[in-house]
Amino acid sequence: MDTLAILALLEAKAGKENEVEEFLKSAQPLAEQETGTTSWYAVKLGPAKFGIFDTFKDVEGRNAHLTGEIAKALFAKAEELFATPPQVEMLDILASKVPKV
């Protein structure tokens, strides 16, 4: 079971909503390359609210993600795309339901 997660909450600047959406979609291939990232989701919470949720089996996987290409790109674009700095929360997973393989 994955025991750790990250939740990043993002608010697009006015007029940048489509760019944020495309930016998040473009990050999916980078997430595929991260061997320590078990699951990765880019979500839309509202007209200008977005998020990224990812899960990890261990702290090494989470740390690799935090210093990886997605994080670098996110913070490089933050001032251009977001109304406020990304709010990044480190989570402990208490319980989950995953498909049986």
Image (tube, rainbow, N blue to C red):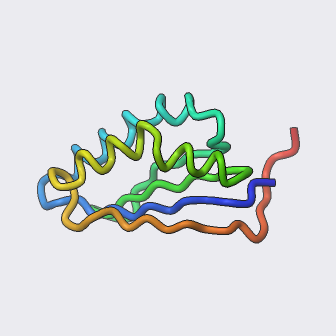
Left or right: where 96 falls relative to 18: right
Q: Residue at x 39, y 64 (%)?
A: 9
Describe residue 42's horizontal placement relative to residue 20 as left or right.
right
Q: Relative to 61, is 70 on the left or the right?
A: left
Image quarter in which the C terminus is found: top right
Instruction: In the rendered view, tell whether residue 97 sits above or below residue 76.
Output: below
Residue farthest to the left, as pictured:
15
Horizontal and vertical percent position of residue 8: 44, 61
Q: Residue at x 64, y 33 (%)?
A: 35
Measured as percent of width and height from the top left, residue 53 is found at 53, 56
Residue name at image x 15 percent, y 51 percent: 80
Quadrant for the N terminus, please. Answer: bottom right
Residue 46 vertical position relative to residue 24 in the rendered view, above or below: below
Residue 45 percent across, percent down from the top left: 40, 63
Work out whether residue 47 or residue 96 is closer to the camera in this orientation and state it. Answer: 96
| In-front residue for pair 69/23 | 69
Q: Residue at x 75, y 54 (%)?
A: 2
Question: Which image quarter: residue 34?
Answer: top right
Count of numbered circles on the image:
0
Residue 5 image offset from top left, x and y in percent = 61, 59
Q: Is residue 62 above or below residue 68?
A: below
